[in-house]
Image: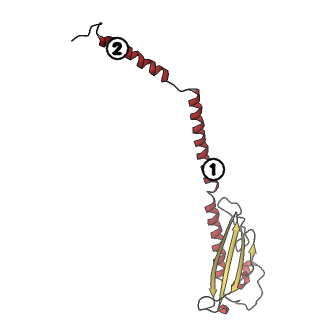
Amino acid sequence: MSINSHSPLSRSFPAKKCQERRKLDSQSGLTLIELLIFIVVVSVGVVGILSVMNQTTRYSSDPMVRKQAIAVAESLLEEILVKDFSDPDGVAATEASRDLYDDVDDYSGFSASPVKDINGSVLLDGAGNPLNFTASVSVTAQAFDVVPGADAKLITVSVSGRGETITLSAYKVNY
C-alpha cells in the first residue's frame, strides 16, 4: 500500500512534526531567573555544609586537650600514691621542694602553674609547646569503708586549663 500526496495521512504528519520542533525550540535552555534561583539554592547549601565543617574542626582538638589533662592528673596522682602514708624521717613539716617530698601529706595544698614534672621541667605537648595546665592537690584524712579516718587519706588532684578541668581522687591507707 502506498501513500499518495492527496492522502489525509500525508498532510497531518509534517504539521505534527513542525509542532514538536517548535515545542522543543521554545523549551530549550534556562531563563535568567531559573539560573539565579539555582545559584541561590546551591549557595545556601554550600554555606550550610561549610558552617558545619567549621564547627567540627574548631572543636576537633578538645579530645586531645582532655586526654592531656587526664594524663597530667594521673601522673601527679600516681606520684603521690607511691609515697609513704606517714613521714618516714619523722619531720612533720613539708619538704623544701617537690623532689624531696617523701610522704602523702607533703603534697597537701600543692599547686603548680604551669604544671611541671618532679624535676621542675615544664610539661610540653607533642609539638613542643608548654601545656599551660594548672594543678592543685588536697590531702584530707577521711574514713574509707572499714578503715578509720586516722588510717586513710583522700587525695584529690585537679588539673585545669584550656577550658577543661579534670579531678581525680584516690585513697591512700596505712597498712
Residue 137 position in % (x across, y down): 71, 78
Which residue is at 69% across, 73% downward? 158
Compared with 37, 164 (above or below) is below
Furthest-left residue in this view: 1
Badge nearest the viewer, 1 or 2: 2
Q: Which residue is mark 1?
A: 54
Residue 112 locus on image (x, y percent): 75, 72
Q: Is residue 68 above or below residue 87?
A: above
| Residue at x-position 63% and y-position 58% | 61
The residue under the point 66% across, 91% down is 149
Count of residue discs: 2
Residue 1 in picture, x, y percent from top left: 21, 12
Sequence-first tag of 1 and 2: 2
* Label 1: how many Cα within 10 Å (few below 14, some 14–19, many 20+): few
Element type where label 1 sits in the image: helix
| Residue 117 appears in the picture as rendered | yes
> Residue type at mark 2?
Ser
Image point (28%, 9%), residue name: 7
Q: CA distance from mark 1 to mark 2?
A: 63 Å
Q: Which residue position is annotated with label 2? A: 12
Q: Position of residue 148 (x, y in %)?
A: 64, 92
Query: Residue 22 or 109: which is nearer the viewer?
Result: 22
Location of the C terminus by quadrant is bottom right
